[in-house]
Amino acid sequence: MWTAPAANTSEFSLEFGTTCLRVDPSVGGRITEFSARGANVLCPLDDLGEWTNGGSTFWTSPQSAWGWPPNPMVDRARYSARLDDAARCLTLDSPLFELAGSMVGVTKRFRPDLERGAVIVEYVVRNHGPAVSLAGWEISRVAAAGRSFFAGRDTRALGGLPSPRTTLDASEWTWMDHAEQHVEAKLGADAARGFVAYSSPQLLFLKTFEAEPPATCAPGEAQIELYVKPGSYVEIEQQGPYRKLETGAALTYRVVWYIRNLEPHASTASVVELTHSLLHEENSRA
């Protein structure tokens, strides 16, 4: 199930069925691999000096509270790690870091859901200083090929960038073809259903979460966000509700990850059918 780091690596590995998840506590507790039959859906890591690209990470929202680059204590510092074999749970804790005049810490928990063939990811932000308002924000970087899609409303441009090119299907799902994006762009949307997904020629990557009312979003942000670095990568992002945390209070943001292999040359209809099937199974077990 879980494998602790070997002598030549710092990554913890979770393997079940055809699924593999790898997490590296030494680089901000980042998810470095989420794969099916050896095919990793996430971009490899890239050290950019002030911050680390690739994989999947977690920040607090809104970005206006910290600017750029992300605080290294949450994005790239070493997290402490605890592996509970009995509970099949890996827990990582960040160093404390400053946020909007307060001090907060992030805990990440990863455990398999064997019945659904999924991984449950929980992010906990605990406030150790004066009251502060924030939301949870997960950022997963995938290739600049394939398509991202979601069921959403009020799609709009974010971050002072143009909105990427998208299409709307008969079910009112929004699709973004990564290969058609030629300029840096970012969109935001309210979630009509609690999911955002990405399909490559061989993989379906689905993230599910609790859909909240649009009014709960952090200022200037959105529940679903897609950022395009043309020719390099796409960020598939989603955010939880914006909450005020008093001293000692904590906020938990829970996401469920699925990965499935696709048949060669899988049609859009088959991708949609598989997505519906996974969403239905999750709802029936909720």
Image (cartoon, rainbow, N blue to C red):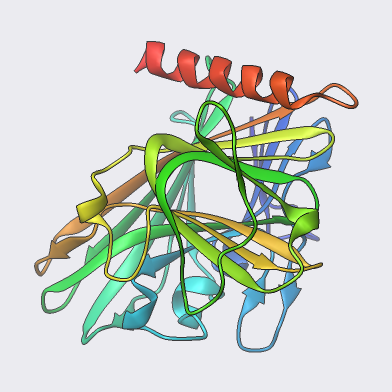
Location of residue 187 with respect to 6 vertically, above or below: below
Q: Looking at the picture, tell me which residue is in the foreground, 263 or 245.
A: 263
Residue 173: x percent and y percent? 53, 35
Residue 81: x percent and y percent? 49, 56
- Whether residue 114 appears in this view of the structure is no
The number of discs equals 0
Residue at position x 61%, y 88% in the image: 50
Residue 68: x percent and y percent? 49, 86
Residue 254: x percent and y percent? 37, 42
Residue 237 shown left or right of residue 232 in the figure: left
Residue farthest along the right direction in this orientation: 264
Location of residue 136 with respect to 72 vertically, above or below: above
- Whether residue 16 appears in this view of the structure is yes
Q: Looking at the picture, tell me which residue is in the foreground, 159 or 194.
A: 159
Residue 278 shown left or right of residue 8 in the figure: left
Residue at position x 85%, y 21% in the image: 263
Q: Looking at the picture, tell me which residue is in the foreground, 241 or 126.
A: 241
Residue at position x 37%, y 36% in the image: 192
